[in-house]
């Protein structure tokens, strides 16, 4: 364990930090592995199965299923980027993490989160075209998918790269102990000695860019067009079928963005919301979408049918 800092003491850039997990829980936090462990296992098995099915079956090499496969790959990376360290801290107690590894984890967590937000946006546009212009689906979505596939990773890297750089510029820290289960950007910034206004403003700007532009702008706009199209349909059966096409995707969006409110509680409820709540919600925010997204994939008939055939064939050997 790192020594507790004395008043007014600072440390030079440390070789490593100490992750403590959930503050104030002590040995009781080991029980949280019964929550986060199965979530990570579901993310691994579910996303891995989706990737295998889409890769093996050439009939699924269509824009909708390729988006699902991209989402599954992103989920695997996002869950793996924190789960192994998280489970080790919860099970074994405080653990050291190298300074560079902490910055790398911070980069990948935020990059994959931004990438997932972009993929959900593309899926919302996909649903809008399916419902609104089904006859032109193949030509429109194929062009959009090619453009998005080329730009989305670059966009995610570009907007997230300043995060670790803004932390790396600090040369002195108030402590070496991070009271968190992974290298969260805000938890690390709390330890630095210096002005952190740029870090705070950039974190808030990124949140607004993801939540404000993606949700309030493009995703809401896509579903607004879907709603208008559905209301023009002549029968109730057509209404039900159209809404059923995109209802599962709405649940995926809610699972991704609603836990993100933990960041707002951290920014604006610092003195009223317990730190335990911040940390629990930050971990749920990163592990719940990867665990729940495979369920969305299994709700699609083509994927469900292929999963059944794939499982049956594997059981024969």
Image (tube, grey):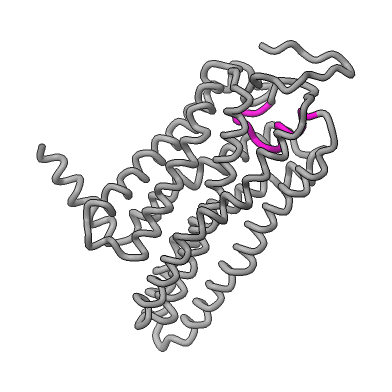
Quadrant (top left, top right, bottom left, bottom right) of the N terminus: top right
Q: Looking at the image, which residue is at 82% across and 19% down?
A: 10
Residue sitting farthest toward the left? 316
Horizontal side, residue 308 vs residue 8: left or right = left
Measured as percent of width and height from the top left, residue 260 is found at 63, 48
Quadrant (top left, top right, bottom left, bottom right) of the C terminus: top left
Q: Looking at the image, which residue is at 63% across and 25% down?
A: 99
Q: Which residues are magenta?
A: 179-192
277 drawn magenta:
no
Measured as percent of width and height from the top left, residue 232 is found at 47, 87
User: Which residue is at the front of the view, 246 or 94?
Assistant: 94
Q: Relative to residue 170, is residue 296 depicted above or below?
A: below
User: Which residue is at the front of the view, 30 or 2?
Assistant: 2
Measured as percent of width and height from the top left, residue 282 is found at 62, 39
Q: Looking at the image, which residue is at 52% across and 33% down?
A: 82
Horizontal side, residue 78 vs residue 189: left or right = left
Measured as percent of width and height from the top left, residue 123 is found at 46, 64
Majority secondary structure of magenta residues: loop
Decide if residue 160 is in sight here.
yes
Q: Looking at the image, which residue is at 44% across and 36% down?
A: 40
Query: Residue 219 sits in which quadrant?
Result: bottom right
């Amino acid at each position: 364990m790192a020594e507790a800092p004395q008043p007014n003491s600072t440390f030079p850039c440390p070789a490593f930090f100490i992750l403590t997990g959930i503050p104030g829980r002590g040995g009781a936090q080991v029980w949280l592995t019964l929550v986060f462990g199965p979530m990570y296992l579901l993310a691994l098995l579910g996303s891995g199965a989706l990737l295998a099915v889409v890769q093996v079956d050439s009939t699924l090499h269509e824009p909708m299923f390729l988006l699902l496969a991209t989402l599954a790959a992103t989920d695997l990376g996002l869950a793996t980027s924190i789960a192994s360290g998280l489970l080790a801290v919860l099970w074994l107690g405080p653990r050291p993490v190298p300074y560079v590894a902490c910055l790398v984890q911070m980069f990948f967590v935020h990059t994959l989160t931004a990438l997932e937000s972009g993929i959900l946006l593309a899926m919302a546009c996909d649903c809008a075209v399916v419902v609104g212009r089904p006859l032109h689906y193949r030509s429109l979505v194929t062009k959009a998918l090619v453009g998005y596939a080329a730009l989305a990773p670059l966009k995610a890297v570009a907007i997230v790269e300043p995060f670790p750089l803004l932390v790396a510029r600090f040369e002195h820290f108030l402590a070496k102990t991070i009271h968190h289960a992974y290298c969260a950007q805000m938890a690390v910034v709390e330890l630095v000695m210096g002005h952190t206004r740029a870090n705070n403003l950039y974190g808030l700007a990124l949140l607004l860019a993801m939540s404000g532009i993606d949700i309030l702008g493009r995703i809401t706009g896509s579903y607004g067009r879907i709603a208008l199209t559905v209301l023009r349909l002549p029968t109730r059966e057509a209404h039900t079928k159209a809404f059923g096409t995109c209802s599962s995707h709405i649940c995926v969006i809610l699972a991704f963005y609603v836990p993100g409110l933990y960041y707002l509680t951290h920014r604006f409820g610092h003195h009223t919301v317990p730190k335990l709540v911040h940390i629990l919600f930050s971990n749920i925010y990163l592990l719940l979408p990867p665990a729940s997204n495979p369920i969305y994939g299994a709700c699609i008939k083509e994927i469900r049918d292929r999963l059944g055939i794939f499982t049956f064939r594997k059981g024969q050997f």
